[in-house]
Image (spheres, helix red, strand yellow):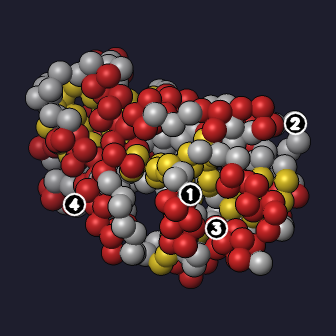
Amino acid sequence: MHKVTTKEQAIELLDSYDSFLFDCDGVIWLDNDLIPGVLELIDHLKTTKKKYAFVTNNSSRSRENYLSKFAKLGFSDVSKNMIFPTCYSAALVLRERFQIPEGSKVWVLGDGGIEEELRECGYIPVGGTDSRLDDEWDPDHELLDVDPEVKAVVVGSTKKLNYLRIATTVQYLLHDHKALPFIGTNIDRTYPGPKGRILPAGGSVVLFMKYTCDRDFVDVGKPSRVLLDAILELTNFERDLTLMVGDTLYTDIKFGNDGELGGDAGGTLLVLSGGTKARDLESLDDSDVSLQPSYYIESLGHLVELMRL
């Protein structure tokens, strides 16, 4: 684990890789605020003919929604095939791994991003943002009756969690002796919000449903190797020459390490602008090498500042 502190180290780091995978929250932005220096770094990558993509465990936004956010924050040349939110990976796993037929219904505990990506893959989302799920609790509510046409369940981030949403999702996760595939979009407990606040993330919802229904789920977010392998295949990034940049040890850094990015030299860069702070590195368990970043630095903006020296 090496701290990047000089201009020479910053340049060598960027020169050592051909492709870059960036987490978003805490790395590129904090909520709706762009982290200073990020656009300059992206311009440098474009100038030096490097490739890059964005991979986020946030399932609330679809790729189309992310395109709008990138544009609003001043990014140019970001295309849909460069963005990998877990709502998209959930739809891909349903299609490729479980071979759920197009036209099938999928129960959603989550926000609109999941619904949008399911529709794009030919599925019919039910639950999700259905306004009836905003009702007060009623043990005779119509949505508590299982729709026999539902073929899978996807659980992700939502800011509208209530008892009715939990109870209806329980019906599907326990239905037919827990036969329906259970897709969880991520395991993140929290994420960095504005004004230094730490906010609950989608993993808190996924793990709550796992505990409640006493069943495992298929994790389609970081640090899943399934997600990384799919991204490398779709982008044609070379594993040994790819760097994962993130702010969370147990998702981003583990994602890159378990996926063997960067070859023998390692391929993970931790930034301290999000959920992980310097004090967390001081207490890091040396025995778990999957959580140890190859490099760390205060932020992407600080990387740019070093290059200017």
Cα distance, mark 4 to mark 1? 50 Å
The residue at the point 54 percent across, 51 percent down is 50
As drawn, the residue found furthest toward the bottom would be 195
Q: What residue does disc 2 label?
A: 287
Q: Which residue is mark 3?
A: 300
Label 2 to label 1: alpha-carbon separation: 37 Å
Tell me which amino acid carries mark 2.
Ser
**Side of 13 relative to 85 (left or right):** right
State the image coordinates of residue 90 (x, y, percent, origin top left). 35, 36
Q: Residue 96 versus residue 135: which sits nearer the camera?
A: 96
**Residue indicated by mark 1:** 48
Pick the residue in front: 111 or 13.
13
Residue 161 rendering spot, x and y as whole percentages: 35, 57
Residue 249 x, y percent position in the rendering: 69, 49
Could you classify mark 3 by the number of other residues whose Cα lies within 10 Å: few (under 14), some (14-19), or many (20 or more)?
A: many
Mark 4, residues whose alpha carbon is within 10 Å: few (<14), some, or many (≥20)? Answer: some
Q: Examine the rendered structure and indicate whether residue 197 appears above or below residue 190.
A: below
The residue where tag 4 is placed is: 134
Amino acid type assigned to the residue bearing label 4 in the image: Asp
